[in-house]
Image: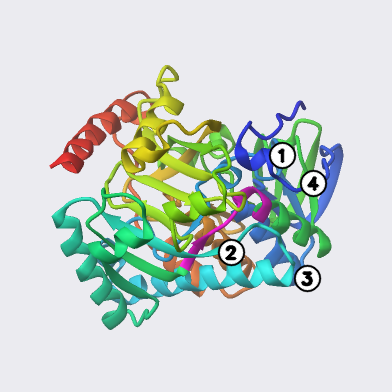
Amino acid sequence: MQRPAHIGSYYAASAHPAPERPALEGSVECDVCVVGAGIAGCSSALHLAQKGLSVVLLEQHRVSWGASGRSGGQALVGVAAGQAKLERLIGRDDARAVWEVSVEGVALMRELIERYSIQCDWAEGFLYTAVKPQHVRELQAEVSELRDRLGYPSVRYVPREELRGLLATDRYLGALYDGNGGHLHPLNYTLGLAAAAEQHGVRIFEGTRARHFVPAGGQVRVQTPSGEVRARNLVLCGNVYLGDTAPALTSKIMAVATYIVATEPLGEARARELIANNAAVSDMNWVLDYFRRSADTRLLFGGRVNYSGLKSFDAPGATRARMARVFPQLAAARIDYAWGGHVDITLNRAPHFGRLAPNVYFLQGFSGHGIALTGIAGKLVAEAISGTAARFDVFARIPHANFPGGAALRRPALVLAMLWYRLRDLL
């Protein structure tokens, strides 16, 4: 089938060369079939192959064509739902286990980058910024919670005076700094994971959609346009792109659009003036702004989530306007790239892992926290398939409701909810 190239983003323009893998023709057998070659799928394939299992990885388009190759590239600990909500959903002990997995996820990412010499412009540091006084109080409480109760020493509170020396803007009142977080080139990182998986014997087929699957007799048969995979286990990592391949999963996640612009190269001195410590930055608003420096001194600025699904929305213009609100000194800067992509969110903003059958696993719903968490998710599913499912099952116990309104009404309902959250950001 025809496979689209990566969308016209800064990441695609600066991606390392990668082979074009063949489409699947005919029938193949393996221990595990993985669907979706983003970070979650490539990590699952890699960790399964490291355990000696034969793996086939199917990708409808190109490796890292979806969210993994378009995102803001910010590597964070925790989950989007927040620790307090997790404790209400699954109890303190299991919520603590999820937290520890998320911290391990950042460590695993660093380990994989080093072990496989993945050139992806990794840079340390993350700033979580307060826009209004209530945010300052919340951040100070969060720093105490992370350091004192969760034993996470990498964070500290940055007061406004110090923050002004780090970010060339008056917009923020303070920040939480995490020296363990950071940012990278997400497309090059995912391409590196795919190459590492192939080193361990994984067979990757691009331009190959998994149309449907049938578990039967301890085996799963996965049908593709020109062939079939017969596997003992199946791992679904397609998120919002799975569609009718796994209809049971579609009601649990919603595709929302987010957008990024990349300025012209600003030069080392000017880029350093904007973000002195080269940290990734995200504000605390529900409809948030996030930004970072690229390795070639551009500012990458994202946000302006679109929940309506309307294509008439002027994403590049709106995103540029938000950038100029944070950094007025960039109002005349040339925009070289503008692109968008879909984030898969769950109703409770917690990740959604589980099984559709005893040998059919899925990973989805990362809700904007995917750079590090998707990688460790792949390791957890490999553990589960190899017989050690305890950590995977902690995530599988997180309850998830369907988005209300069914297929026809759930997006209008979400738009109304988001109007309320946008209003709350302004208060």
Q: Are marks 4 and 1 in contact (CB under 8 Å)?
A: yes
Q: Nearer the viewer, mark 4 or mark 1?
A: 4
Going from N to C along the chain, the mark reached first, 4 or 3, is 4
Could one spot residue 364 in this view of the protein? no
**Gap in angstroms between the C-alphas marked 4 and 1:** 10 Å
Q: Secondary structure at mark 4?
A: loop
Going from N to C along the chain, the mark reached first, 4 or 1, is 4
Instruction: Kindly identify the amino acid type of the residue bearing the numbered disc 1.
Output: Arg
Going from N to C along the chain, the mark reached first, 1 or 3, is 3
The residue positioned 33% from the left and 43% from the top of the image is 326
Relative to 351, is 105 on the left or the right?
right
Across and down, in percent, residue 137 comes to 16, 63
Q: Which mark is residue 52?
A: 3
Instruction: Kindly identify the amino acid type of the residue bearing the numbered disc 4.
Output: Ala
Q: Which residue lies most toward the top here?
A: 312
Q: Are marks 1 and 3 in contact (CB under 8 Å)?
A: no
Q: Quadrant of the C terminus?
A: top left
Going from N to C along the chain, the mark reached first, 2 or 3, is 3
Nearer to the camera, 209 or 329 = 329
**What residue would you read off at disc 1?**
62
Instruction: Kindly identify the amino acid type of the residue bearing the numbered disc 3.
Output: Gly
The residue carrying pointer 1 sits among few (fewer than 14), some (14 to 19) or many (20 or more) residues within 10 Å by Cα, namely many
Magenta-tinted stretch: 181-189
Going from N to C along the chain, the mark reached first, 1 or 2, is 1
